[in-house]
Image (cartoon, rainbow, N blue to C red):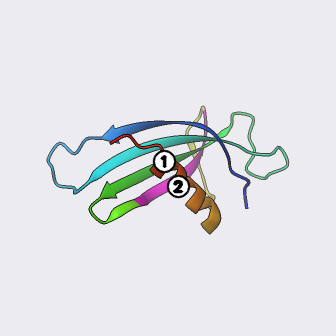
Amino acid sequence: MISLNITGHTVEKLVDPFGLLSGDRFEFFIDIEVDEEDELYTDKGIGIRVLFVVDDNGSKISNYHLYERGTDKVLDFELEEDEELLVFNYCNENIDI
C-alpha cells in the first residue's frame, strides 16, 4: 500500500472529434508525495495519470497508471481500493465541465 498525499494536478478535457463517445472525458495528471522508505519512491517523483469519464451514468475512472515524473516511465503498481476511491473523489471534485 502506498500512502497517497496528493500535492497537485493538471487536467485537460479530451475532445472526441467524431462524437462517438458519450459524456465527457478528462485526463488528470495527479502529483503525489511518496515516503522515502516506500518501494515506489524515486528522486524524480511519482504521478498518477487518470482517464476520468462523466456521462449520464455518473462518474468513473476509466483507466489509470502510476508513472515516474520526468521520464514518464510507467510503474507496475496498482492502487488499493481505498486509494482508488481517494483518487476518484479527488478527480470528481476537480473537474470543470
Amino acid residing under circle 1: Glu
Vertical side of 82 occupied by 95: above or below = above
Residue carrying label 2: 89
* Marker disc for residue 93: 1
Q: Which mark is on residue 4? A: none
For image coordinates 35% across by 62% down, the residue present is 58
The residue positioned 46% from the left and 51% from the top of the image is 92
Between 85 and 62, which is closer to the camera in this rendering?
Answer: 85
Q: CA distance from mark 1 to mark 2?
A: 6 Å
User: In this picture, which residue range is highlighted in magenta?
Assistant: 60-69
For image coordinates 80% across by 51% down, the residue present is 38
Mostly what secondary structure, the magenta segment? strand
Whether residue 30 appears in magenta in the rendering, the answer is no
Q: How many marks?
A: 2
Label 1–label 2 contact, CB within 8 A: yes
Q: Tell which of 23 and 20 is nearer to you.
A: 23
Circle 1 residues within 10 Å: few <14, some 14–19, many ≥20 = few
